[in-house]
């Protein structure tokens, strides 16, 4: 079916872009049953959250290192600069975040089917991101390259800080015990899921950094997946806390949605 690596690469990029639409539609009716949405009755086999996160995010590291060595840009320092933000994000998500979870989570309450589905997505996505940077990207040092990289990196870095900070706030509340509490402070005063907002904007920054269809596909699919999840989180908070939940908060985009 695929006569060349380029055909495979283009097919996966196109597939992720196309799948963003049915993913968005499906997420309007089905909420991923992990975290606060977990119910043992309809979640099937469940595993430990730290193990789930380390497993499903792992292709972003090991596959990236494998694929990167095979590209024509492997010896180009600019390629290493380009891939660095992507690796920084996933070192946190694959290694550091699960370690934080390990000290706070003792239950097997992460559905195995979600972990496997995410693993497959990350397998495909890690391939196209690392293959683009290591082989197909034009790593030529010019003015437009550094302008895009600078703007994209600024957005990526600042929003990664937001993402990590928001995760830390939520984990801190969980470690206090006594059930779920209303998170407050910072961007939590404006949206229910600043961690999702941070991640969405990170991958917009990545799309600017790479200036590629692969980066755009990742950003579009992230929006299709996380925006409905943020809306579900917002509805959950409103239903649980009622009048105590701040009425001016939006789901994911401050003042908008």
Image (cartoon, grey):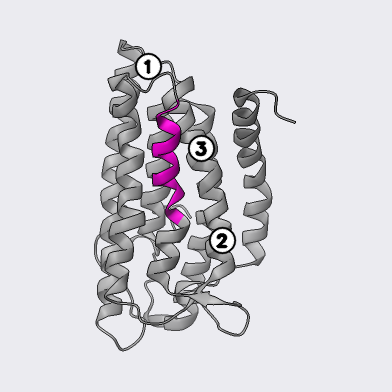
Residue 207: percent from left, percent from top: 44, 33
Query: Which mark is drawn over residue 127?
Result: 3
Q: Quadrant of residue 151?
A: top left
Q: Are marks 1 and 2 in contact (CB under 8 Å)?
A: no
Residue 180: percent from left, percent from top: 36, 81
Q: Which residue is drawn at 35% across and 55% down?
A: 93
Q: Mark 2 points at which residue?
A: 116
Which-is-in-front pick, marks 1 and 2?
Answer: 2
Is residue 69 shown above or below 175? above
Is residue 162 shown above or below 11? below
* First in residue order: circle 1 vs circle 2: 2
User: In the rendered structure, which segment of residues is drawn in magenta?
Assistant: 57-70
Query: In the orientation shown, which residue stands out farthest toward the bottom?
Result: 178
Within the magenta stretch, is there residue 119? no
Which-is-in-front pick, marks 1 and 3?
Answer: 3
Horizontal relation, residue 231 to residue 21: left or right: left
Q: Quadrant of residue 32?
A: bottom right
């Amino acid at each position: 079916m695929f006569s060349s690596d380029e055909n495979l690469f283009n097919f996966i990029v196109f597939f992720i872009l196309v799948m963003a639409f049915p993913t968005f539609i499906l997420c309007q009716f089905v909420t991923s049953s992990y975290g606060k949405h977990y119910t043992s009755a309809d979640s099937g086999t469940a595993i430990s959250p730290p193990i789930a996160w380390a497993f499903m995010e792992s292709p972003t590291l090991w596959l990236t290192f494998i694929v990167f060595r095979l590209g024509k840009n492997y010896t180009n320092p600019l390629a290493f600069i380009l891939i660095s933000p992507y690796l920084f994000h996933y070192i946190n998500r694959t290694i550091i975040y699960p370690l934080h979870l390990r000290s706070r989570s003792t239950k097997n309450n992460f559905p195995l089917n979600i972990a496997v589905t995410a693993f497959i997505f990350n397998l495909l996505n890690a391939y196209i991101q690392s293959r683009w940077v290591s082989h197909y990207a034009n790593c030529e040092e010019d003015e437009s390259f550094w302008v895009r990289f600078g703007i994209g990196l600024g957005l990526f870095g600042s929003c990664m800080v937001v993402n990590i900070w928001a995760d830390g706030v939520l984990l801190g509340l969980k470690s206090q015990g006594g059930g779920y509490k209303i998170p407050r402070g910072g961007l939590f005063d404006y949206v229910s899921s600043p961690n999702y907002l941070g991640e969405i904007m990170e991958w917009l920054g990545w799309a600017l950094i790479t200036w590629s269809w692969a980066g755009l596909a990742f950003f579009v699919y992230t929006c299709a997946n996380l925006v409905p999840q943020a809306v579900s989180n917002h509805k959950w908070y409103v239903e649980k806390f009622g009048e105590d939940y701040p009425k001016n908060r939006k789901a994911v985009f401050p003042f908008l949605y």
